[in-house]
Amino acid sequence: MRSVAGLLLSVIPMVLLAYDGPALVLTQTIALPDVEGRFDHFAIDPKRRRLFVAALGNNSLEVVDLTAGTRLQSIHGMSKPTGVLYLAGVNQVLVANGDDGTLKILNGTNFKVEQNLKGFDDADNLRYDPKGNLVWLGYADGALAVFDVTTAKVISQIKLRRHPESFQLEQGGTRLFVNIPEAKEVAVVDREKRAVISTWPLQNVNANFPMALDESTQRLYIGCRSPARIVVLDTAAGKTIADVPICGDTDDLFFDAGRKRLYAACGEGFIDIITQRGADNYKLMERITTRAGARTGFFSALLNQFYLAVPSRGNQAAELRVFSIGN
C-alpha cells in the first residue's frame, strides 16, 4: 500500500517555481513491443539520430530511429545488459552485460558482435574518456577497467571498496567521481595516476546510484533513494553544501548546463526537474507524471531532447517517451 505522503503527491499539486511553459514537452511515444522487464542505461548516436537502450530484463539491446519514430532492431543474445556506449569515431556500440560478465563490441552498422571480451563480473556503467581515447567500465565487487579504444585491450584496472554505480569524468581536469552505494561514499579517481586519491563519505543518505556533474560551478549531484534526495557536493573539497527532496527510486540524473537544470528519472512514476538558482541554491521546478518503474532515461543537449524508457506493466506495453526541452 502506498504511504499517505505518496498518495498526496499524486493528487495534490505541489508548490513549484513560476516559469514560462513546461520544462519537458512529450512529443513522441515509440512502441517497444514484446520487450519485458526493466531497462537500464542508454547511449545515443546524435548524427544518425539513433538511440541505444539496454533492455536488461529482456536480454536485448533496443535500437530506436528517432527521426522515423520507430524501433530499428531488437538485438538479442545479451545477458542482462546494463551499460551502453556509442563510439562515433569507430562506429561501434559497446554493451556491458552484468550476468555473464562480458563487454560486447558491436558493429555500429549491422550490429554484429565483433568482439566479446570476458571476465568483467557484474559489468555495469560505461564512459568514454576523450583524453587518451579510452573507455572506462565499472564492474565486479569494486573495480574500474580502462580500455584502449583502438585495440580494445585493458590497459589498467583500479580497485574500489565496493561495486561502482554511476560515475562522471571531468572534462577540464583529470578526476573521475564514482558512486559506491554499499560504502555510502563517492570515490575520487585520478585518471592519469589510475588510482583512488580520495573518498567522500555521504551522511544521512543511502543508495547513491545516479550522478551528474556541473564543472562550471564545481558541483557534483548525487541521486539518493533513501531518503529520496539530490545531495550537492563541492568538488573542490567533497563537502555537502545543499540537498533537495525528489521523488522516489531514482536511477538516472542529468545536468542541463545550458538551462541550469537537473532531470531526475524516478521509478515512483515521475520526472523531477530541479532548477539551479545558484551554485548552492536548488528548487523543484516541475514534476511530470510518467509510469511506475520508469526510472531510466537520457538527456541529449545536442538534440534538445530527454528520453524515458517506460517498462511494460499489466496490459500496457513497453515504450520510449521522447520529450522536447522547454523554456
Image (cartoon, rainbow, N blue to C red):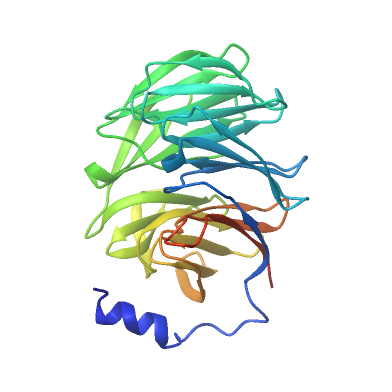
296 lies above or below 323: above
Nearest the viewer among 73 and 104 is 73
Residue at the image position 37 percent from the left and 41 percent from the top: 165
Image quadrant holding the N terminus, namely bottom left
In terms of depth relative to the viewer, which is nearer, 315 or 61? 315
Residue 199 quadrant: top left
Q: Which residue is drawn at 77% across and 50% down?
A: 68
> Vertical placement of 156 versus 313: above or below?
above
Q: Residue at x 63, y 21 (%)?
A: 112
**Location of the C terminus (image quadrant):** bottom right
Q: Position of residue 296 (x, y in %)?
A: 48, 52
Measured as percent of width and height from the top left, residue 238 is found at 35, 49
Residue 89 location in percent, x, y?
72, 26
Residue 246 location (% of width, % of height): 39, 68
Instruction: Tell me which residue sits at (38%, 66%) in the image.
Output: 268
Using the image, determine if residue 163 lies above or below residue 219: above
Choose top left, top right, bottom left or bottom right for residue 148.
Answer: top right
Residue 125, visible in the rendered structure: no
Q: In this view, does 132 lie to the left or right of 122?
A: right
Q: In this view, does 170 lie to the left or right of 64?
A: left
Report the number of discs: 0
Q: Can residue 32 be seen in this view?
A: yes
